[in-house]
Image (cartoon, rainbow, N blue to C red):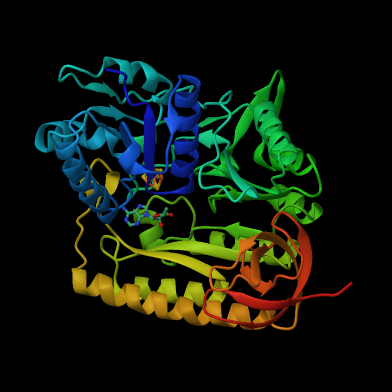
Amino acid sequence: MEKNKNIFIETYGCQMNVSDSEIVVSILKEAGYNQTNDITQAGIIFINTCSIRENAEERVRKRLNYFRSLKKKNPGVVVGLLGCMADRTKVALLEEEQLLDLIAGPDSYRDLPHLLNQIGNGQRAINTLLSLEETYADITPVRLDSNHVSAFISIMRGCENYCSYCVVPYTRGKERSRDAASIVRETRDLFEKGYREVTLLGQNVNSYAWKNGSNPINFAQLLELVAMVNPLMRVRFSTSHPKDISDELLYTIARHPNICKAIHLPVQSGSNHILDLMNRKYTRENYIDRIEAIRKIIPSCAISTDIITGFCDETHEDHQDTLSLMQWSRYDYAFMFKYSERPSTLASEKLADNIPEDVKEARLREIIDLQQKLSYQSNQMDVGKHFDVLIEGVSKRSKEHLFGRTSQNKVVVFPKKNRKPGEYLQVMVTSFTSATLIGVVDES
Ligand code: 5AD
Ligand code: SF4
């Protein structure tokens, strides 16, 4: 019987995983497979997974149960688990779930066509080896769920910072940077296809390092090369580590109007005691110094952050330090999480996860409440100001409105008139809701 070569892929976790799914589809298309958005038509179902917190893994397990019910109806369907959960859980998943036909880690996607060929007669295929070199530099990703305006470009893989709470060094392996020329080429290619925004992705983009012969290229230089592809191509990047964000990078951002004025700078905690236990390699004072540098060199820059609450041994005073640093930094936006212990990490081996769940929850609530106030104040400051907006699409709430983003990464909704996605315009902000600015188009 002819095999059903339609692949359905579902992605969990960070932007890097979204980017990886695009690489997976590209590799499999080359090998004669097709991508489908209709799971009922799929002969192969892939789930690209995340391990960052316990609840991310739980979500994946729930989906696997659903796939099990599909497989009961149609035993021929192949179910494969990709990404960050591949290694940690492979044995348990295979033996307990009796569902997966294939398991592939983040560095083994080139092997997928071969792994798929191995499956059959009850045989399963696994490759979870991590690599020191793989960057998928030569693969042109197939853009999934794309608005044809903005795209992700992965510029490096892995992480070697070993923050004590974090599973990423174990799931994604050693840090390696991708060939700068291939990144510039991909940007140019996207521009020619009509894209107007790229986001350069890495776990810690500030430590990007590529050697072009004897000529080393750091992240500030790469960002400049990408920004110079075309002034109409907006450039974003994520994520920055506070210990590595240099003045050189800030001046580069300030110099190029098309490098977006938004920096995501995860603080994790405002307490030196906790930052030390987290192995973050900076102090509260170092962090404040970096925020001051951003405010001085790029006055219009938005700053967002990640915060973990309820980390091992966190006292009431440590928690107050986080609240006061949030207040001081005036974050425009924040992602906030309860600490979730992950197997293999330094914290799981050396520190006790000793903050009771109800305390973690109460602290998280306080942090979220404070951030809501800060985000409200940040939006309020935008009222009456004019922003360059790149149009991304039609507003979900009204067909008569479009939405786009400011350089500071805020979503703005405004009347459609005869404008189209991919175009720039100037909008004056007139009001806002909790998540969106509302504006009118400047008539010029
Ligand atoms: N528990 C809770 N949050 C975590 N993060 C990373 N590891 C954990 C963990 N074990 C958060 C950090 C990071 C973001 C991507 O996820 O804030 O910056
Ligand atoms: Fe991304 Fe980390 Fe989740 Fe892996 S574990 S998908 S790197 S957030």
Residue 114, horizontal then vertical, whole percent: 35, 16
Q: Position of residue 417 (x, y in %)?
A: 75, 70
Answer with the quarter of the image where residue 208 lies.
top right
**Residue 288 at least partly seen:** no
- Quadrant in which the C terminus appears: bottom right
In the figure, is residue 21 to the left or right of 221? left
Q: Quadrant of the N terminus?
A: top left
Q: Nearer the viewer, residue 391 or 73?
A: 73
Residue at (28% x, 44% y) in the render: 346
Q: In which image quadrant can residue 158 be found? A: top left
* Closest to the observer, 160 or 31: 31
Up the image or down, 337 lies above or below 86; here it is below
x and y percentages locating residue 186 in the rendered image: 66, 33
Residue 137 higher or lower than 117, as above or below: below
The residue depicted at 15 percent of the width and 20 percent of the height is 122
Residue at 69% across / 45% down in the picture?
Answer: 195
Location of residue 83 in the rendering, given as x and y in whole percent from the top left corner: 35, 36
